[in-house]
Image (cartoon, grey):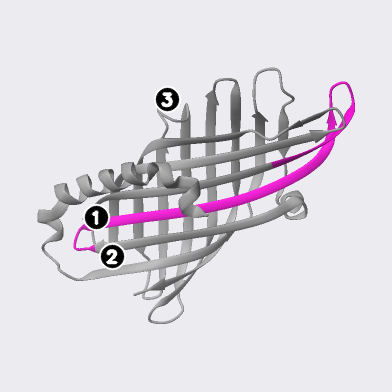
Amino acid sequence: MLWSVFGGIRAIAVMVAMTVVVALMPVAAKSQDWSGQVTLYGWGAGVTGDFKPFTGAPTLSFDKSLSEVLEDLDAAFFVTGLARRGDLVLLGDFTHTSSSRAGVVPPGIPASGKLTMQSLTLAAGRRIQAGTGATVDLLGGLRAWRIDGKISSPVLRIAPESKFVDPILGLRANAHLSDRWSLLGYFDVGGFGVGSDFTWQAAVTANYQASENLYLSAGWRHLYLDYSDSGTVFDGAMSGPIIGATWQF
């Protein structure tokens, strides 16, 4: 299903990744060994924002705390992967959330709504050594979005879908605090009117090395999106605590 959702942007993503790889190949060639990691994480994101499927349609509004999100959450899945060879860094991230609610639309008609959001981020860049035990990754890439909104009432049923791709620029920093503890920060910004009008994301986690290959993390993540096209509007954010487990290989 993932490839069917984002199949239209695979060629673009591969071309961008290959361009970056070729540009950084002399740097990466210093080391022939690949290393990687996969992180599965839970994100207790409170959802705020408005979704309007087309001009004149009712607006589906979300303003939920973490407890409300857990009550109305239909499905959620999050995974991040990173591969490195020398100073070359490849990053991928996939998120899926689906949330529903019931209410009324003007002039007081009972209605129910459901909002499903999926994003796939692919980025590549260069790692810079920033001192003892600290690294900074400079990244560029793409984030593909799919937003499905469904509004149902006795007099109206609409189920629009929006798909678009944003260019992004990112920064990922990792600092070792002790033998087992480290601090990770991530920030990216994008859109620039290409896909969405504007999007940005920030996350910070404290990480504990539980074994040679296993790391446990806890922190906070915030993701904002402002998108409008042909009457379809989404302006909102997801923000909340994250916990994760990372396996390095």
Disc number at residue 133? Answer: 2
Using the image as rendered, state which of residue 89 and residue 117 is in the foreground: 117
Instruction: Decide: is 173 above or below 146.
Output: below
Q: Considering the numbered disc 2 on the image, is that residue within a helix, a strand or a loop?
A: loop
Q: Which residues are magenta?
A: 85-114
Q: Considering the numbered disc 3 on the image, is that residue within a helix, a strand or a loop?
A: loop
Q: Is residue 98 left or right of residue 20?
A: right
Q: Amino acid at mark 1?
A: Arg
Is there any visible trace of residue 43 in the rendered image? no
The mark that comes first in sequence, 3 or 1, is 1
Q: Is residue 241 magenta?
A: no
Residue drawn at 29 percent across, 53 percent down: 136
Q: Which residue position holds label 3?
A: 193
Instruction: Decide: is 134 above or below 111.
Output: below
Q: Amino acid at mark 3?
A: Gly
Q: Position of residue 107 (x, y in %)?
A: 88, 21
The reply to whether callout 1 and callout 2 are in contact (CB within 8 Å) is: no
The span from disc 3 to disc 2 (Cα, nearest Å) is 38 Å
Is there any visible trace of residue 14 in the rendered image? yes
Residue drawn at 24 percent across, 55 percent down: 127
Total labels: the figure holds: 3
Using the image as rendered, state which of residue 61 and residue 218 is in the foreground: 61
